[in-house]
Amino acid sequence: MSIDITAAFDSGNIVVEEINDTSATLSIRKDKDSDFFQWFHFRVSCAIGDELTLAIRGLKDSAYPQGWPGYQACVSEDRDYWGRTESSYDDKSGTLTIRYIASSNIVWFAYFAPYGMERHHDLIAEMAAVEGVTCRTLGYSLEGQPIDCLEMGSGDKQVWLYARQHPGETMAEWWIDGALDMLTDPSHPQARLLLQKCRLHIVPNMNPDGSRRGHLRTNFAGINLNREWHEPSAEKSPEVLCVRNAMDESGVDFAIDVHGDEAIPAVFIAGFEGIPSWTDEMGRKYHAYRDRLAERTPDFQTELGYPVAAKGKANLSMSTNQVAERFGAIAMTLEMPFKDNRDLPDPEQGWSPERCQLLAEDCLATLAEQIDDI
């Protein structure tokens, strides 16, 4: 009996080219009105004991083909625990072949552990019910979904944490999930300190349309939101426009834009070195945060990362650079891997939701230790 495959659900993405018994040839649907594609998320119905062979073709033309060598696909049979399964990439044909022996009649596969919009709404509902947390709608996406912002704390330092400008980078919302869990724990000393000294503005998902549609990188209009911060518009990028407007109202002292990187097998941050208003004092504070985070957790490192922009050459259409330039803020882009962490590999799960959540705690604890210097 042949297997069945579908992606007709929240954040699903796959195209079924051919099914032959327990094998299938697949491809990934492009983001709407865009050439970006890399995210996949689909369900296989099968018999227990089936040896599944799933070949995803056409990946030479994907957004980041360098992300496939060494990559192991995520798999789950309960949509709660996500492990990794044997995967191999043929560079010549551009095919990723996923192999898995089913121990359930239904198996889910994904590029990274999904964080769908229903889970997002559960998170918002849970957090909005916590004493001291305010939820407000900053605006709406092109398809009318709310851009939720959770706010808490009574201090003067204005801290912004925001995620999933690129919807396929689901590790970013897992990170936010961990940050919120820490901040709403009344027994956590560093959380109490941050709430005393800061006003925190947290946007768990800046791209709900792309998230629901199973996009990698763009919104409903095919726009990369992290290239809109210099001049966002209601017509193309209302998601950025409403967040930037809210930042203009509050000001920003410290900001983390949370992302995932397809190719680099490590956690790292990218700063704002090339902005026109860069000062050595801003650099000292940024590097102090980065170095202290590296001391705190071995899951973070400073060896691998992006090239540093030359003086005055920063791309101000990107949020980290725009926020640093616009507000004089200590801003950064936090990147987590789709692959495993090179320095601390985990064959069972690779980089995982659990590690995203733990990393968020370390990032906030580091901020708490340096908040008086921000």
Image (cartoon, rainbow, N blue to C red):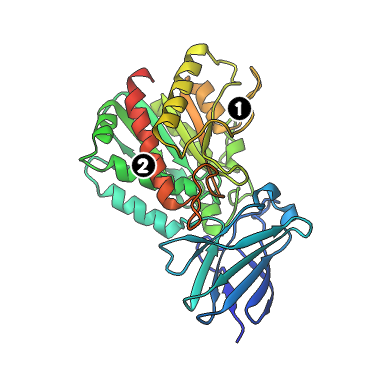
Q: Which residue ends up furthest to the bottom in the rendered image?
A: 1
Q: What x and y, as percent, mark residue 39?
A: 60, 56
> Which residue is pictured at 55% across the width and 44% down the height?
342
Amino acid type at mark 1 = Leu
The reply to whether discs 2 and 1 touch (Cβ–Cβ < 8 Å) is: no
Q: Which mark is residue 179?
A: 2
363 w.r.t. 166: above or below: above
Nearest the eye: 226 or 101: 101
Q: Earlier in the sequence, mark 2 or mark 1?
A: 2
Assess disc 1: are there few (<14), some (14-19) or many (≥20) residues with their C-alpha within 10 Å of its C-alpha: many
Q: Residue at x 48, y 27 (%)?
A: 331
- CA gap, disc 2 and disc 1: 27 Å
Residue at the far top in the pictured view: 280
Side of 78 where 183 appears, left or right: left
Dot 2 amino acid type:
Ala
Residue at figure coordinates x 47%, y 22% from the top left? 286
Describe residue 16's horizontal placement relative to residue 241 as left or right.
right
**For mark 2, does the 10 Å Cα neighbourhood hold few (<14), some (14 to 19), or many (20 or more) residues?**
many
Residue 330: x, y in percent? 46, 24
Which residue has dot 1 on it? 316
Is residue 99 placed above or below 295 in the rendered structure? below
* Residue 177, placed above or below residue 284: below
